[in-house]
Image (cartoon, rainbow, N blue to C red):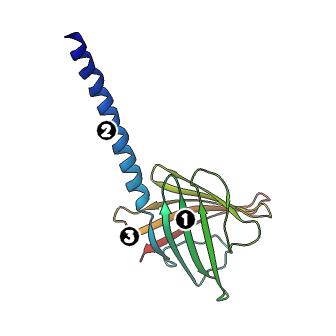
Amino acid sequence: MKMQRVVPALIAPAMAWLCVVLLARAALADDTDHFLGRWHWNKAQSTLAPGDPTPQDVKASIVSADNGHIKWTADVTDNHGKRHIETFDGRPDGTFFPVLGAGRDVTAAFTIVNGALRSIFKGANGASDSQSCRISADDKQMTCHGTWTDGRGASEHYIDVYDRT
């Protein structure tokens, strides 16, 4: 008789823990799903670093953003009207992967922490760019707060705002 009471006593906490884990995974997946989609840079709401040339246009497409994989493409038209396509395909675990089309030896590392998509970009000359992006409550905007560092000690802050398209 005692054995029958012990088994339910062990199963109930195990089931409760399983529910917590499954709900946490669902919440995490739901958090990162908000980043998926097409985004268009909002020039009026963004704040460039002082002296930074203003691009004519920026579009981004995030096709995967979860704890196992992140993949995106950026279509940038620079201040001279020249179009650049950049792509990233890697793990969001802090490991640096190449950013194709971004220039010589540019790499990026991504993490997803507390609903924020965080990144660090590094260039061959020691410059780096770190960002933390969050999605608005209505799911219509992504705001990225960033700091660009020149590799010699100077840094500039900026804010990029993207509208969902």
Q: Nearer the viewer, mark 1 or mark 3?
A: 1
Query: Which of the marked residues, 2 or 3, is nearer the chain's N terminus?
Result: 2
Q: Element type at marker 1? A: strand
Quarter of the figure that contains the N terminus: top left
Q: Amino acid at mark 1?
A: Lys
- Left or right: residue 147 versus residue 7 is right
Residue at mark 1: 71
Where is residue 70, by image quadrant?
bottom right
Between 28 and 153, the one lying in front of the other is 28
Query: Which of the marked residues, 1 or 3, is nearer the chain's N terminus?
Result: 1
- Verify CB contact (< 8 Å) between mark 2 and mark 1: no
Residue at mark 3: 140
Question: Residue 51's x, y, as percent?
Answer: 69, 75
Q: Amino acid at mark 2?
A: Cys
Q: Residue at x 77, y 70 (%)?
A: 104
Question: Residue 6's x, y, as percent?
Answer: 26, 16
- Left or right: residue 45 versus residue 86 is left
Residue at mark 2: 19
Above or below: residue 31 compared with residue 37: above
Q: Element type at marker 3? A: loop
Q: Nearer the viewer, mark 2 or mark 3?
A: 2
Quarter of the figure that contains the C terminus: bottom left
**Alpha-carbon neighbours of circle 3 within 10 Å: few (<14), some, or many (≥20)?**
few
In the displayed image of the protein, which residue is found farthest to the bottom? Answer: 81
Question: Residue 23's x, y, as percent?
Answer: 33, 44
Q: Residue at x 28, y 26 (%)?
A: 11
**Alpha-carbon neighbours of circle 1 within 10 Å: few (<14), some, or many (≥20)?**
some
Q: Element type at marker 2? A: helix
Q: Residue at x 34, y 36 (%)?
A: 18
- Verify CB contact (< 8 Å) between mark 2 and mark 3: no
